[in-house]
Amino acid sequence: MPSSLFTSIDLRDLTLANRIVVSPMCQYSADDGSANDWHRQHLGSLAVSGAGLLMIEATAVEQAGRITHGCLGLYSDANEAALGRVVAACRRFGNTKLGIQLAHAGRKGSAQRPWQGGRALRREDGAWLTSAPSPIALDEGWPPPHALTAADLDRIEAAFVAATRRAVRLELDLVEAHCAHGYLLHEFLSPIANKRSDAYGGSLENRMRFPLRVATAMRAAWPSEKPLGARITGTDWLPGGFSVEDAVVFARALKAIGCDYVCVSSGGIVPKAPIPVAPGYQLELAARVRRDAGVVVRAVGLLAEPHQVETVIASGQADMVAMARAFLDDPRWPWHAAEALGAAVSYPPQYERSRSTLWPGAKLVRPARAAE
Ligand SMILES: Cc1cc2nc3c(=O)[nH]c(=O)nc-3n(C[C@H](O)[C@H](O)[C@H](O)COP(=O)(O)O)c2cc1C
């Protein structure tokens, strides 16, 4: 049977060679939002991986929308020029399409890099005032954010549009709105972070209003032949939080405004939630959203074993699979999955000689894994 994972998929006029997506991964290594040599080698390596799509990390639409001082941004001409250099290198050598995730960190901003502790920044380390739907701190030890006013919402919507326009100029293939992991757009969606009493709080319809406003404005600024997606949360994993039923409603609403797929993730609205982390733990959420909302779905979350990932696509649980840590561990994951599934994948010519089929009877010996 031919592999389902290695079949192409069309999103508007964009064709992805296969269903494998490099999940967006913050690198916390930018200079005032500008990409540098780290991003060039990180994305450059993943751009020759054979994945159908490489997502550039959560990229802040305004400086105060970064998580850390090292987060990538697309809020200045310098940011755009720096990312342009990285994109050009990926295009020159790469064989994957390039997408970008646009984001605003909301009350999770002004944080240390994960390897510095991931806590709220202190004033002497350059803390800034964060903002959110309601002035509720993320957790103990975090300052209360500023509750966004109507004028702030206009400004942030305009920032998403401006960043989208920069992505147009960079000729990226796809843009995605980050509506998950407890960042600003998710904070509007979740009753845990959103206690507003205006048109943006209360009912699900009201809580969806700002994320949908942003996605609609992005859609209008993005070429009609190119796909726009969203990463959404499938559940907050908390009583009284955003639920999978809400995710279905939100996904339907996104589809109605011209969104071409949703990536179903979960968690992150507060640091401590009982998340049942296990291989494929978000798959049921993805399958449910796909079935009930009738949208194209990307699954994510501890999916790394090639046959398991193949089954996700073949069984119709999702249309694409994103992987993050598996790609950090093995940037050649698609080559090895193609080998395991008997499928074809494109190599850059410089690396073609590592293709296992060119070594009949003398397979490359890879170090054994503990689990193998
Ligand atoms: C280093 C790292 C950075 C991440 N940064 C982002 C990000 O920028 N945007 C996002 O939506 N998710 C981010 N995530 C979450 C991943 O995209 C993915 O959803 C999560 O790691 C689960 O997938 P996995 O089990 O394949 O790693 C990050 C994960 C890692 C490990």
Image: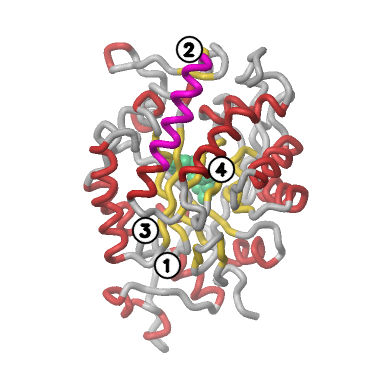
Label 1 CB less than 8 angstroms from ligand 1: no
Whichever of labels 1 and 4 marks the residue nearer the N terminus, that label is 1
Q: Which residue is labeled 1 in the image? A: 50
- Which label is found at residue 146? 2
- Whether the residues at callouts 1 and 4 have beta carbons within 8 Å, the answer is no
Q: Nearer the viewer, mark 3 or mark 2?
A: 2
Foreground: disc 2 or disc 1: 2
Q: Which residue range is magenta in the image?
A: 149-164
Q: What x and y, as percent, mark residue 261?
A: 60, 51
Q: Nearer the viewer, residue 33 or 112?
A: 33
Q: Is residue 157 magenta?
A: yes
Q: Residues within 10 Å of mark 4 (few under 14, many from 20)?
A: many
Q: Helix, strand or loop at disc 4?
A: strand
Q: Is ligand 1 less than 8 Å from the beta carbon at label 4?
A: yes
The residue that label 4 is drawn on is: 231
Q: CA distance from mark 4 to mark 3?
A: 20 Å
N-terminal label among 3 and 2: 3
Which amino acid, mark 1?
Gly
**Left or right: 115 in relation to 13:** left
Disc 4 residue type (three-letter): Arg
The answer for how far apart the CA atoms under marks 2 and 1 are is 43 Å
The residue labelled by disc 3 is: 46
Question: Along the line of sight, which residue is nearer the eye, 42 or 132?
Answer: 132
In the rendered structure, which disc, 2 or 4, sits on the residue that comes first in sequence?
Answer: 2
Q: Is residue 79 left or right of residue 51?
A: left
